[in-house]
Image (tube, rainbow, N blue to C red):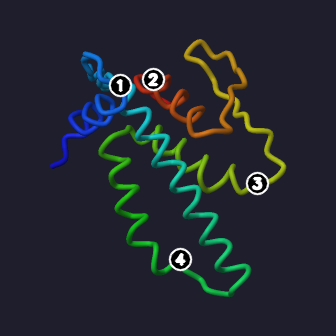
Amino acid sequence: MVDYRVMVEKILKSIHPVEFTIVENPLEKEEMNKKLFIEVLDSLKKIEDRRDFLEEEIGLDMTTYEDKFMVVIENLFHIAFEDHQVALIRLYLYDLLPDKDWDGRVTIEDLDGTERSVPFKTSEDVWNLITEVEKKPID
């Protein structure tokens, strides 16, 4: 395994021969989970776009081929999240994103019964909402 810290240190010392120390500040677990979730959702959006392009422009339907992969991905979501959170992820990816007239917001009901509109346009918005409803049961 390559130690990138050593490589960077060698390169920097060859350019600027001064003493310095490189300190690693790893992300907190919650920040890393958020970053990975956003990357996964963005990748899934690109996969859906590519599948739609292949079907519309070339006439090649990749759905049957990709189904097994999507089952694995959704099962991993079920391991990491509650059912109501996975439902929000699916709503975002498969129902709302393809809708060109959608305004990028969803209406949710708080535990006290009040409704509010929240942003749901980006992968980060999805993360923010599913972590907000993490402990809240949705009927």
Quadrant in the rendering for residue 125: top right
Q: Position of residue 9 (x, y in %)?
A: 26, 31
Location of mark 1 (residue): 16
Q: How crowded is mark 1: few (under 14 residues within 10 Å), some or many (20 or more)?
A: few
Q: Do the residues labelled 1 and 2 touch (CB within 8 Å)?
A: no
**Kind of element beneath mark 2:** loop
Q: Where is residue 112 in the image (x, y as percent from the top left)?
A: 59, 12
Q: Which of marks 1 and 3 is in front?
A: 1
Disc 2 to disc 3, C-alpha distance: 27 Å
Name the foreground residue: 47 vs 1: 1
Position of 2 with respect to 121 (left or right) is left
At 38% from the left edge and 72% from the top edge, which residue is drawn?
68
Amino acid type assigned to the residue bearing label 2 in the image: Lys
Residue at the extreme right of the image, as rendered: 101
**Kind of element beneath mark 3:** loop
At 71% from the left edge and 21% from the top edge, which residue is drawn?
116
Name the foreground residue: 90 vs 111: 90
Location of mark 4 (residue): 63
Amino acid type assigned to the residue bearing label 3 in the image: Asp
Amino acid type assigned to the residue bearing label 4 in the image: Thr
- Mark 4 or mark 1: which comes first in sequence? 1
Amino acid type assigned to the residue bearing label 1 in the image: His
- Mark 1 or mark 2: which comes first in sequence? 1
- Mark 1 or mark 3: which comes first in sequence? 1
Location of mark 2 (residue): 136
Disc 4 to disc 2, C-alpha distance: 34 Å
Q: Residues within 10 Å of mark 3 (few under 14, many from 20)?
A: few
* Depicted 71 relative to depicted 19: above or below: below
At 53% from the left edge and 27% from the top edge, which residue is drawn?
128
Location of mark 3 (residue): 99
**Kind of element beneath mark 4:** helix
Q: Nearer the viewer, mark 4 or mark 1?
A: 1
